[in-house]
Image (cartoon, coloured by chain):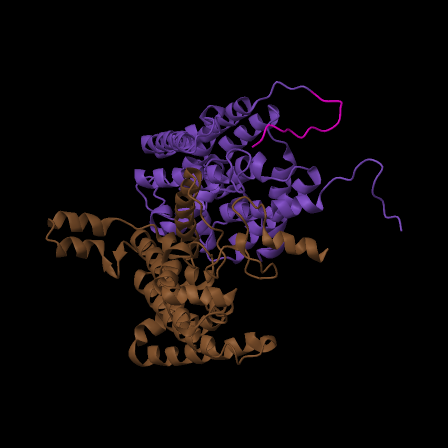
Chain colours: A brown, B purple
Amino acid sequence: MSEMNTSKKNSNVVAPLINGLLKENPTFVLMLGMCPTLAVTTSAINGMGMGLTTAAVLTMSNIIISLLRNIIPDKVRIPAFIVIIASFVTIVGQFLQAYLPALNDSLGMFIPLIVVNCIILGRAEAFASKNNPIASAFDGLGMGLGFTIALTIIGTIREMIGAHKVFGISFADIATIVHAPASVSEWLSAQSPIAIFVMAPGAFFVLACLTAMQNCIKNRKLAKGEKTKIQSGCGQDCLECSDTGCAHRFYDQDGKDCAIGKKEENND
Amino acid sequence: MSGIKKVSSTPHIRAKDSTAKIMLRVILALLPAALFGIYNFGLKALLIIVISIVSCIIFEWLFCCITKQKNSIFDGSAIVTGLLLAMNLPVLVPWWLVVIGSFFAIVVVKMLFGGLGQNFMNPALGSRCFLVISFPKLMTDFAYDTFSGATPLAELKNGGEVIVQNMILGTEAGTIGETSVIAIVIGGIILIATGVIDLYVTATYLLSFAAFVLLFAGKGLNLYYLSAQMAGGGLMLGAFFMATDYATRPITKKGQVIYGILLGVLTGIFRIFGPSAEGVSYAIIISNLFVPLIEKISIPKCFGKGGERR
């Protein structure tokens, strides 16, 4: 199965890239890596920085894990993955400290915590350990950029509503930059932002709204009869996958024919 | 919701109560406090009450239209939410803040969770807490009689003197509906007399809060301090109108007693040990979240079942 998959992916490196960006966006579709998504997206810059850092770690760890996929024994694969990921997180963390100290300070603890980000371990387990290095690299890049875009969008919305700023520039300053009348920028600076949006609850509000929006689009497509596959996390359709023991199988839209349910039945 | 209704076994009592009728009684009971608020703070208070009620109704109607649900604005619950929200706001808030508050109360807290009876916390209070966190400056700007002072509770917290008679009468700074103990108690009596609420939650709340203040405030048996704490802030409004909300209080009497004690203790902790002087709204919404757990431990035993047999 994985051989066929490899040859298919090999011919087209764009597919895993698009897959990560849109179809299986780690944040909005797979719902992975929620901890950094909710915690660091207080501003667009923070979200983008976190996303790009994760993307860098994800791409490099995917390549190395894919290269070592035939060497790492199955039974100790998780510790081995973690060691590889942790090494890259350390390297990237040192880079940030040296060249982007401000970003490093505002992300703080969440840089070392990338080690336990489920997107990275998830892609290592679901994709990199089964596919060749090139496809894995593009998968990591696609997933990483999808994560970056999602975090930047969440960060931008939260910053705009919660602090009246876009990428750190306040609305009033923007009005001055575009030569709006002085009264406009005065009016803008007098408004009080909804501060809860840059606090923890705001992250949940924004994420919920964005996820609801993309579910709405997906449901409309389903209603029109366009078949959408069941998101699996490995680029395959869970309905047509024979690997019933796979830990990454996902539920169907209305909970029918779910692999996880089947597995539980077998256990009984 | 599906059409299936879970009905207990016979015999059944038939009552003429409907949601709209109960809501009408609640509105009636809220009127004394609302009217006193208008008397106390001027016509600006009336304006805020009207904006709040109208925007609550409009948001509920819009939500029902957009999600293609049966229109639920005629059960009157949106009016109650709007009125309660306005009574929880200081009189100086700008109009858009009231609209944002109504949106949060109706759409986020109430309708998104399934509408009336499904809300997990009191919509008006959830919205008030949202507003307090979002706009701390605007929401704590209590001005009264051109004197921009603190509320009596804040003064009490800072060791100042307060006049308890004024707090009971209500001629003090505060939110629109919370100041007058007399008006709220009249409303509470109307609620009890018309059978909308009983005293389980309210009495246990007030008693446990009083006990907490006596035990932990470090003032000893100081009746002046105790009465100021009881009359100040949103305690009375919360105890009679917010904590007794049908959807967010436990069903059984045993559960309601536990819930009331939890409310009293939490309010006491927030007021005495917390950084801010007021703690009723947080205490109520946190206790609302505990209600499912309280229900779990207060399920009545079926007849003929139970007992500690081994």
Residue B38 image position (x, y, % from top left): 38, 30
The region drawn magenta spans B1-13
Image quarter of the N terminus of chain B: top right
Residue A114 image position (x, y, % from top left): 44, 71
Magenta span includes B23 = no
Residue B304 image position (x, y, % from top left): 85, 37
**Residue toward you, B36 or B200:** B200
Q: State which quadrant residue A14 falls in.
A: bottom left
Is residue A118 among what the camera can see? no
For this orientation, the residue located farthest to the right is B310
Q: Residue at x 88, y 48 (%)?
A: B309
* For residue B3, side relative to residue A212 (left or right): right
Magenta span includes B6 = yes
**Residue toward you, B57 or B39:** B57
Relative to residue A125, is residue B31 depicted above or below?
above
Magenta stretch, main secondary structure class = loop
Is residue A113 among what the camera can see? yes
Residue A170 image position (x, y, % from top left): 23, 57
**Residue toward you, A15 or B139:** A15
Relative to residue B221, is residue B177 depicted above or below?
above
Q: State which quadrant residue A37 falls in.
A: bottom left
